[in-house]
Amino acid sequence: MQEAREVRTTCPYCGVGCGVLAEVAADGTTTVRGDPDHPANFGKLCSKGSALGETLGLEGRLLRPEIGGRQASWDEALDLVAEKFSQAVAEHGPDSVAFYVSGQLLTEDYYVANKLMKGFIGSGNIDTNSRLCMASSVAGHRRAFGEDLVPGVYEDFERTDLIVLTGSNTAWCHPVLYQRMLAARKERGTRIVVIDPRRTATADECDLHLALDPGTDVLLFNGLLAHLAHTGKTDAGFIRDHTAGFDAAASLAAADAPSVARVAKGCGLAAADVHAFYDLFAETERTVTVYSQGVNQSAHGTDKVNAIVNCHLATGRIGRPGMGPFSVTGQPNAMGGREVGGLANQLAAHMDFGDEANIDRVSRFWNAPNVARRGGLKAVDMFQAVADGRVKALWVMGTNPAVSMPDASRVRAALSKCDFVAVSDVTRTDTTRYADVLLPAAAWGEKDGTVTNSERRLSRQRPFLPPPGEAKADWRIICEVAARMGFGEAFAYRTPAAIFREHAALSAFENDGKRLFDLGGVADLSDEDYSAFVPRHWPASERGGHQTRLFSDGRFPTQDGRARFVPVRQEATAFTVDADYPLALNTGRLRDQWHTMTRTGNVPRLMANAPEPAVDLHPADAAAHQLKDGDLAHLSTRFGFVRARVRVADAQRRGQAFMPMHWSGQFAARAAAGLLSSPVTDPHSGQPELKHVPARIAREEAGWAGVLITRRDLRPTGFVHWSRHAVEGGWIYELTGTEPPDQGILLARKLLGAQRRDQLLEYTDRRGLAYRAAAIDEGGAMAEALLVAAPDQLPMRDWLVSLLATRQPLSATDRHALLSGRSPVPMPAIGRVVCACFHVGANQLASAVAAGCDSLEAIGSTLRAGTNCGSCRSEIRAIIDARRVQAAE
Ligand code: SF4
């Protein structure tokens, strides 16, 4: 028997890049905890990270290569991919092929994918789903600093007096960073301003919330720049010595935002709030402005980034402790992808196509005479080229564009038309349906390489499990295809360490300080050093030391060493609502979910907080559309439609709606936000506008509702609406139909597994309007239960779920109760789960508050809720506040 061992690795979810200790017990079970020595998280993990040990099962894993839906050998599959790509290049040229890759790839995977496409196939056509995440920050950084550089480090959040969170629901999307910010607030009184059209969990704990109109951020920050200039709060010495272009930027800002009143009107804010923000910023030397997808995912995202950066340059608040603009990335290795050149408009190692010397340098380093000479297709353009036949062969790696791309219906149509699609992934997804060749990739826990987080800190992802079946590391799959295409010599890596050394060496090659991205100090790591690699920032200096904050000497990697002010003006938003589409729809993340739920969707406790796809509406909008909480709604834009439950939310602004971006066809009939989003992109970054599209909503008249609780993993067809969520021991399927109930019963019964009659308990009411059935397994336990009734007439599920989980033989009383649809003993429902870490529900919290627990601390010591990752604290506070209001009334 093997001994227990502990492996130091990194969380595969968000750009915080938390360190994780994975302990594999002698019996093979794995538990995870935060790594107390990792400088990103010091032992903390959020709900998603804490549940990583529950995502290691093999359900849904791709275990063998497939060609056209049949199992194939690796040789067959790789030969076919190489043949199709080579054939397309030979017949139609290098730009007829493309890779669409992912911020989930490790840096070593990314490096070889980029080298193959740009160096040896000779096309720029490799782009990444990071295009949807932070491409506007990349473009903004390059315009201002001359290179894609995040100046600050996480420690700045603890050394600052003001944090401006703009377009960032940090409490849910970067929870461990948010907890660090709150700790600083408690410690030193750091103030927090939240700029977001929605009142998110982040806004619940701030000093000032500016709920600006969608897309008006440039106006707000131009107003700030004008205010700083007008009130003499700029740093004239810094502007003179270290920047260029201040006058042009300041005069355009002043013309764009001539007064606070004009800004307030244009942004839909109270003038007093705008004043308060401007004064706070002007008076607080140590200010960090954090921005994320709310800024980036916009038709004017790059201008928004530069409007923010302009204010920091004007005040000289950059490169010093506790100050600076700070882009936080969504994905675990978005930064690593930026480093290797995984964006179509970058060549490699922070070198672009704009300079012939870069092309020559990379060509010589790679010994690649056929290196691409111009940038390739960015994500939205790439799928357009697939649709119109310019791209004949596409390889999708570790991402799910059929769900996550805007105007997803068009993307699906493009994939189905494409001559050849290869997909390498860990599980089946909506995208793998379109694959001619499926390549099973290694997953987290099996992969070996490096990632870079939002503060430029490199960490190792280390394997602690063998890849199951025939799954392989992405870098190995790519190199084997490269070899079959005739490039074996350049891709003859034996280990990820060898790839890392080459990547580091390229960053330093003929660099001479011109590019701050320089890993030269770690280019000679031995395999042992790579194995023992401790987290470190780049640029890595010569002998393994490392620098942290950038620009502390006031020098920027531009030709003259000066940062650039970029004059920007508030452009009209890409869309305006109208009578046909009167709601402004925003999309974003849920607290406990990651991307298209391929991992987190299988974990019961992560599904418990938001188990069904829902659209948030302000109470007045819900009333205006004759909708109430829980109704099934048909939500549409000019690009498509979805169905989702209505969630009436006071926090939602009137006239706006919010839909999470996670739901896919694996978890609901039709609820992918990508079906609604617009493919309009930012002209500089190519990043699509995912935060704002006009929408309309109507009630879907339901004739019946059903719930199937089962051990089986199904994808129902023929239903107007279904969604599913994981529970202990299986799944719950929520079903809704527009047919009359008797037809609904017939339809739903088809979902029951093939059962012997003696194993099926059934009851249909006399009028044929309600139906209940339970399938009993060989051991006498409930294998599944189906209940159908009129909408709103279904019983609570808690007891049925407990029967599924326990797998105990049913008593006669249980069998009787199953058919009556009621628990034989009163079973208090815990309500919607609020604390995912300790599985505490809203009803339990409300009872504890009623019993006198009137603070977060009291709740924490009674129920433990809110004491681990902290992501649920704002919801707990809302329950406490609601009770206070009730008591006062
Ligand atoms: S904050 Fe959560 S999701 Fe992000 S890296 Fe840390 S544990 Fe993972």
Image: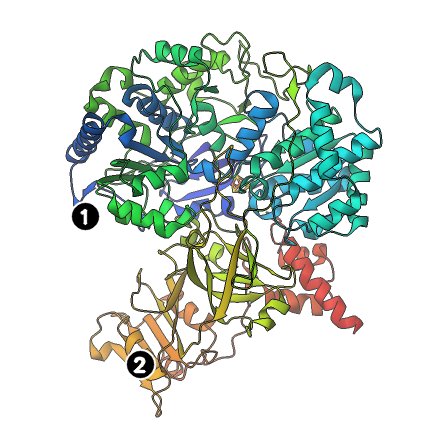
| Mark 2 crowdedness (10 Å alpha carbons): few <14, some 14-19, many ≥20 | some
Per the image, label 2 sits on a secondary structure element best described as: helix
Instruction: Say above or below: 287 vs 197.
Output: above
Please, is residue 452 above or below residue 370 in the view? below
Residue type for callout 1 = Gly
Q: Which mark is residue 535?
A: none
Q: Position of residue 516 (x, y in %)?
A: 55, 16
Tell me: residue 2, above or below residue 645.
above
| Cα–Cα span, label 1 and label 2 | 34 Å
Q: Position of residue 678 (x, y in %)?
A: 46, 49
Q: Nearer the viewer, residue 206 or 650?
A: 650
Q: Position of residue 50 (x, y in %)?
A: 51, 46
Circle 1 — which element? loop
State left or right for residue 150 relative to residue 770. right
On screen, residue 207 above or below 486: below
Callout 1 touching callout 2 (CB < 8 Å): no
Of residues 87 and 860, which is closer to you in this image?
87
Residue under numbered circle 1: 69
> How many tags in the picture?
2
Quarter in which the N terminus is drawn: top left
The answer to whether the residue bearing label 1 lies less than 8 angstroms from the nearest atom of ligand 1 is: no
Percent across and percent down for residue 733 are 38, 66
Residue 668: quarter of image? bottom left
Q: Along the polypeptide, which appears first: circle 1 or circle 2?
A: 1
In front of the other: 406 or 819 = 406
Question: Which residue type does callout 2 highlight?
Answer: Gln
Residue that numbered label 2 is attached to = 743
Q: Residue furthest right?
A: 231
Taking the image as drawn, is residue 162 in sight?
no
Residue at left offset 57%, top offset 42%: 174
Residue 521 visible in the shown view: yes
Looking at the picture, tell me which residue is in the foreground, 258 or 112. 258
